[in-house]
Amino acid sequence: MLSEKIKNAIEESEVIRQSVDLKRYGNDWTSFTRTTFNHIARVINAEVSRQILKKPYLLQEFLLFGNDELDSILFTYKLEDISEFKEYLKKRNPQRPHNWISGKTLYSYWHGGNPKSRKINVLLTFLQIEPQLWDKWKKAGLSTVKQQISKDLQLLKQHYLGHYFRYYQKSDNSPVMLKTPFIIREDPWDVVVVEMKTIGHQYRSSAIALRDSALYIDCENLNWDDKESFVFNIGFDPHPEVLVGVSNTLNRRRQTIALKNVLVRQPKVYDFQAAQGLEIPFDADLSIESVDYQILHYFKSNTHNLMMMPYCSHVEELSQLGRYMALTSPGG
């Protein structure tokens, strides 16, 4: 969640007040429409670009975006390097600045959304806070969160914290099982967070809840504007070795998919930052006594580890969609 200190500073910003007629909407930012936040985002983005031109180290040290996002920007605008991106920022129309943060994202922060660290850096750059003070601003006012821990989150802390490995079949439905790092840990400010990796990407939880014997987790991609949501059955064992459930996300064609997931708690803590995902082919030669072999056998024995839905906009398309799904299913 965004600290109250940052929220208050943005709400009181003279730059925003001079550029957006907030009197029309009152002083309650939670009542602002998405359109209003779009106007506010434009003001913030223009000021952030101005600050970057004064402080180019914000770009050079990747304080506002990751390396992957920079590659995407350079490709989109046909630029060679950071210096050309800096020149590109100089030439942008102030009324149409580079999109450092969107109105949709700002709207979510005033409705309980959990921001990514670099997006908070964008807001602190707008507020002209020096980087050495960023951590202090991020934490200001968040200590009261620990007093608001629900009974459900207390149960989560007591029974489900730990280092896991996540197993699932590859999302292109090829005969490959993925084994990736997945941890549930206590955080001084966010209470309980999930961090996980896929092949090449890292995610962090934006929301966690226990409801009706199920664990719900929403995770945000730290590299791209992407997310993945999970539902795990937790049963009645207070210290389960395995959690099973389903995740929902998009495949490379931006089609919705659902994947069966198995989480296996590890007896020892491992280095999450150093750990990497592993691809295990269905025909891999594994020890019959290993956990990997048992999980692989489970996925090989099930023909429906993945469900995918192509695009469909009209009712009459459903019959064609049914034939397509039959042809592309594992036995089709």
Image (spheres, grey):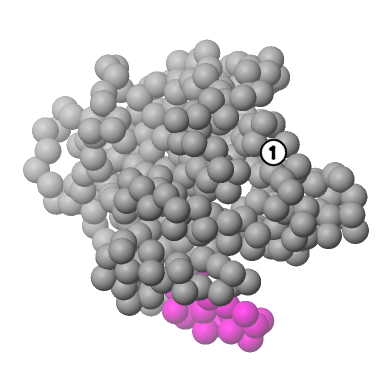
Question: Residue at (44%, 79%) from the top-left corner?
Answer: 324
Tell whether 221 sits left or right of 278. right
Residue most extreme to the left? 285
Q: Is residue 32 above or below residue 180?
A: below
| Front residue (pair 168, 101) | 101
| Front residue (pair 98, 142) | 98
Question: Residue at (23%, 40%) from the top-left corner?
Answer: 276
Local packing at callout 1 (Cα closer than 10 Å; few below 14, some 14-19, many 20+) is few
Q: Secondary structure at mark 1?
A: helix
Q: Is residue 244 above or below residue 19?
A: above
Q: Tell me if residue 306 is in the magenta stretch.
A: yes
The quarter in which the N terminus is drawn is top right
Residue 265 falls in which quadrant of the image? Answer: top left
Tell whether 195 sits left or right of 83. right
Q: Position of residue 298 (x, y in %)?
A: 31, 42
The residue at which mark 1 appears reads as 9
Tell whether 173 sits left or right of 210. left
Which kind of residue does numbered mark 1 sit on? Ala
Region of the chain picked out in magenta, as a range: 305-325
Q: Position of residue 64 (x, y in %)?
A: 44, 49
| One can see residue 153 in this view | yes
Q: Is residue 58 above or below residue 132?
A: below
Tell whether 26 sits left or right of 282. right
| One can see residue 149 in this view | no
Q: Is residue 20 above or below residue 284?
A: below
Q: Tell me if residue 330 is in the magenta stretch.
A: no
Q: Position of residue 142 (x, y in %)?
A: 63, 24
Question: Residue at (80%, 46%) from the top-left corner?
Answer: 30
